[in-house]
Amino acid sequence: MNVLILGSGGREHAFAWKIAQSKQLQNLYIAPGNAGTAHCGINVNISVTDFEAIKNLVWERDIDLVLVGPEDPLVKGIHDFFLQDDVLKDIPVIGPKKDGAQLEGSKDFSKQFMQKYKVPTAKYATFSKKNIEEGYTFLESLNAPYVLKADGLAAGKGVLILDKLQEAKKELKSMLLDAKFGAAGSKVVIEEFLHGIELSVFVLTDGRSYKILPAAKDYKRIGEGDTGLNTGGMGAVSPVPFADEVFIKKVEERVIIPTIKGLNAEGIDYRGFIFIGLMNCDGDPQVIEYNCRMGDPETEVVIPRIESDFLDLLEGVAKQTLHEKAYTTLNQTATTVVMVSGGYPGDYAKGKTVKGLEQVKDSLVFHSGTSLQKEEVVTNGGRVFAVTSLGKTIEEAVNKSFLAAEMISYEGSYYRKDIGKDLINSKEKT
Ligand code: AMP
Ligand code: GLY
């Protein structure tokens, strides 16, 4: 099979690394890719939302399957574009159509969906400019902290958690009346704050059957001890010790099965990943959000724990034969430590020369934001590498990642040295 992966981050490098190992693979293309994916296949410098250029590439290179990494092309309808095109319509796209991508693309849609299909989630209501006064009243009915979510995609910045009622009202006003998040904030979901520990569960589905992929916990804040600004993710661990079999069974029965059934009932033919952001509230799962794609950096710990041929699983999604496919996971712990550019998640410099990559032997270095400049790897993003290691315990794995991260150098490099620490400590207590 000839495969095209769309995207340029660590998630796509992990996909490319895994698919490159498949016996079924002939040629692998990544658009636009990065300096890391260049080792797994051929990078093609095309934007993930330039559908016409993607069409030409698929046609020229005789692509048999397209795997979409990020949400943007899905929410913009790349899958629908393929289905509506005479040349492309029989080429499978892994990732939902526009209707299914709304699970991520519209918070209001996903909350309504959860309510309709009885998926446990925080109490909520949605407001627009027209009923802002009711929004203020709804806020008054809740206890602090207050959770405000812009309905549409806002580059991961559309969720505000506020301690004071006055602040929450002010922010609601600036989202609805002053377009703080542009059109994405023309509707705002206000919801109850959930107390608990967060984790993510990933599902691969062909619309009929599904496989539950390894669960992961990510580390969103820039600073150690979960302090400072939110980022795309500074590290991840899989499996998650507190998400034991009993908990995952609850997730399957209360969340995954009703979600798949709900999609069917809505007439949504969903083929791809469902990323379920969960809160473990005293042993019971509550859904915080759905995403229509895999997480980054979660993919960098999920993929290395999948033993089976990943391309074979994706073919099962495309042909709706996923139930026939072998699926096993590695009984080891994977951790990833994300190395970022100095200044991230604020302004940061690009084009810094990277040294030491060849010294890393015991870890997988997935590139998140790099490019090649005259054969040299240079930084090209806020998140630069996700350094993944496997071990018997979180401690063993994460120490390997820290050692490897120390070998890699570029000006301004920073990473959190406490990835997994909370999980190690909580295990010691039990
Ligand atoms: P989202 O984009 O919906 O994932 O929200 C971003 C982050 O905000 C989540 O990962 C949670 O840490 C936090 N969050 C969102 N909704 C809630 C909630 N209802 N209660 C507590 N925390 C929340
Ligand atoms: N790491 C969170 C995400 O991919 O949305």
Image: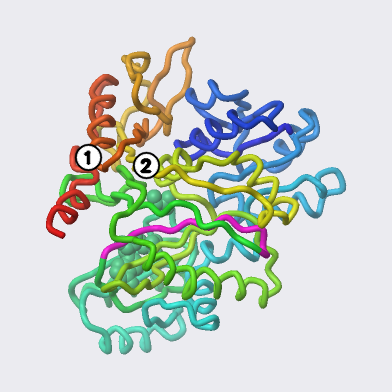
Name the residue located 35 percent from the left edge and 77 percent from the top edge. Answer: 191
- Tag 2 secondary structure: loop
Residue beneath disc 2: 332
Mark 1 Cα within 10 Å, few/some/many (few <14, many 20+)?
A: some
Q: Which of 173/41 is in front?
A: 41
The residue located at (55%, 38%) in the rendering is 7
Give yes or no for residue 39 being in the magenta stretch.
Answer: no
Q: Which residues are magenta?
A: 197-208
Residue 66 sits above or below residue 244 on the image: above
Residue 330 appears in which quarter of the rendering? top left
Q: Which mark is residue 419?
A: none
Quadrant in the picture for the C terminus: bottom left
Figure quadrant, ligand 1? bottom left
| Callout 1: SS | helix
Instruction: Indicate left or right for 250 with 88 as reference.
Output: left
Nearer the N terminus, badge 2 or badge 1?
A: 2
